[in-house]
Image (cartoon, rainbow, N blue to C red):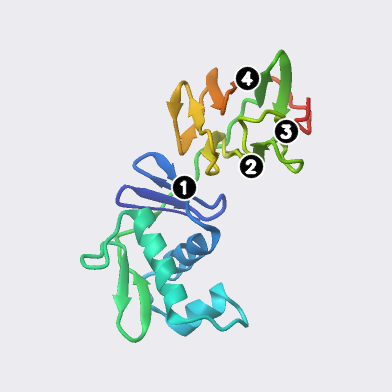
Amino acid sequence: MRVRFGDCEVDTETRELIRSGNPVHVIPRAFELLRLLLEKRPRALSKSELNERLWPRTFVSDSALAGLIKEVRKALGDSSRQPRYVRTLPAFGYAFCGDAAEVAPPPARHTEVSYRLLWKGRDITLTEGEIVFGRGPDSAVWIDDESVSRRHARLRIAGGAARLEDLGSRNGTFVNSRRIEAAVLSDKDEIRLGSVSLTFRILAGVGTTRSDGRP
């Protein structure tokens, strides 16, 4: 389901929230709460129903749900005092109250596209999904450099788009010399993780070959 409201667009399949054209990071459980409110709109959901869906067979205090609602409102740019999207029903629960409409997903690409990463003369093929860059041994793209954090950044390739997100790294993630928290990548963008520079390429009409990203 892809839903648009105000300056926001939510894709429940790719689990993405876009606001004013930019991706917004939402923690998984808060995104699940947003998905439930959107799918059941305009019906109000009780606290007990939400707790059972979000924390099945687990006891949690009311403050846990209230904290998630706060996360959702922050991501949407909403306010508890003058809600545009998430309405509180005292002593009951919450409901999505915005004017929302389902939209068609973007048209499928007919041209085969290859995503590449150029680093130290090496050409790494990237496949769709989430790719973690870092110095940790479990990183999909392993970079053995002290300026790079163990889990430095995450690249998500889905729906014909590539989005890079910093994972709270010590020395920062940069795209074309600009420090970012999250950014949509374009062909030939220069990425810098700490002091390590890489080039992101998008090549049309080139077949993809799976690579584990370890040069």
- Under mark 3, the amino acid is Trp
- Where disc 2 sits, the SS reads loop
Q: Is residue 187 visible?
A: no
Q: Earlier in the sequence, mark 3 or mark 1?
A: 1
- Tell me if label 3 and label 4 are in contact, CB under 8 Å: no
Label 1 neighbour load within 10 Å: few <14, some 14-19, many 20+: few
C-alpha separation, residue under disc 3 versus residue under disc 1:
37 Å
The residue that label 4 is drawn on is 203
Residue 151 circle label: 2
| Front: mark 3 or 4 | 3
Q: Name the residue furthest top.
A: 121
Residue 15 circle label: none
- Where disc 3 sits, the SS reads strand
Q: Is residue 190 left or right of residue 113?
A: left
Quarter location, residue 34: bottom left
| Front: mark 2 or 1 | 2
- Under mark 2, the amino acid is Arg
Q: In the depicted view, which residue is nearer to us: 199 or 63?
A: 63
The residue under the point 39% across, 67% down is 69
Q: Earlier in the sequence, mark 2 or mark 1?
A: 1
Quarter location, residue 47: bottom left
Give the x, y percent position of residue 2: 47, 52
Q: Is residue 197 visible?
A: yes
C-alpha separation, residue under disc 1 versus residue under disc 4:
26 Å
- Where disc 1 sits, the SS reads loop
Give the x, y percent position of residue 102: 42, 55
The residue that label 3 is drawn on is 142
